[in-house]
Image (spheres, grey):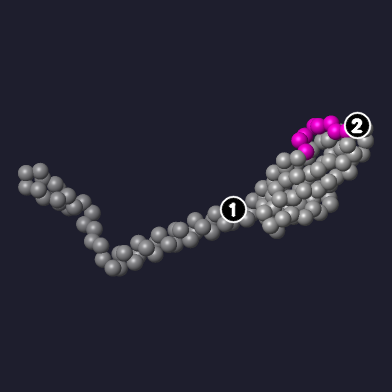
Amino acid sequence: TKDYHPNTGASLNLFNLKITPNSTVFSLTAIAIVALFAYLAFQYLSLSAAPNLNLSSPKDNITVNSDSIEIIGQVDPDAVVTINMGKVNTNKDGNFKDVLKLASGQNTIEVVATNKFNKSRKIVRTVSFNP
């Protein structure tokens, strides 16, 4: 190794690195392999997780004077949605809307999103109907 000396202007060369075509190919191949494994890990984690489920309506613990209520939400586009165990259609963006008939008194609304790996996410809302 060479040490830098301010009076002579000698350069510092601690590692004696030489850039050759072989070292360039090796470096680029190593970077590509690391990037591939990072991508595969990200895909695995995103596919094996429960799907996103957002419910914008109804709010929890509300009281209504109508015998039906609109259920509005969004899920991951490939997820299957059920409301109280009945399948609900979604559009290509994962948005869904359904109307649910309410019984007098307290009603429990269970919305479940399930992906193709059978991972699911559930939101439960309570709505009271007082005619």
Q: Residue at x 81, y 32 (%)?
A: 62
**Can you give x and y, in whole percent of width and height, for residue 19 in the image?**
25, 62
Count residues near mark 1 (Cα–Cα under 10 Å), then give few for <14, some for 14-19, many for 20+. Answer: few
Count of numbered circles in the view: 2
Q: Where are the magenta residues, as a range?
A: 58-65
Q: Callout 2: 10 Å neighbours few (<14), some, many (20+)?
A: some
Q: Position of residue 6 (x, y in %)?
A: 10, 43
User: Which amino acid type is marked by label 1?
Assistant: Leu
86 and 114: which is toward the camera: 86
Looking at the rendered image, the disc whose residue lies closer to the viewer, 2 or 1, is 2
Q: Nearer the viewer, residue 6 or 67?
A: 67
User: Which residue position holds label 1?
Assistant: 45
| 96 falls in the magenta region | no
Residue 61 in magenta? Answer: yes
Nearest to N terminus: mark 2 or mark 1 = 1
| Disc 2/disc 1 C-alpha distance (Å) | 45 Å
The residue beneath circle 2 is: 130
| Looking at the image, residue 29 lies above or below residue 105 | below
- Relative to 112, is 77 on the left or the right? left
Q: Residue at x 87, y 41 (%)?
A: 68
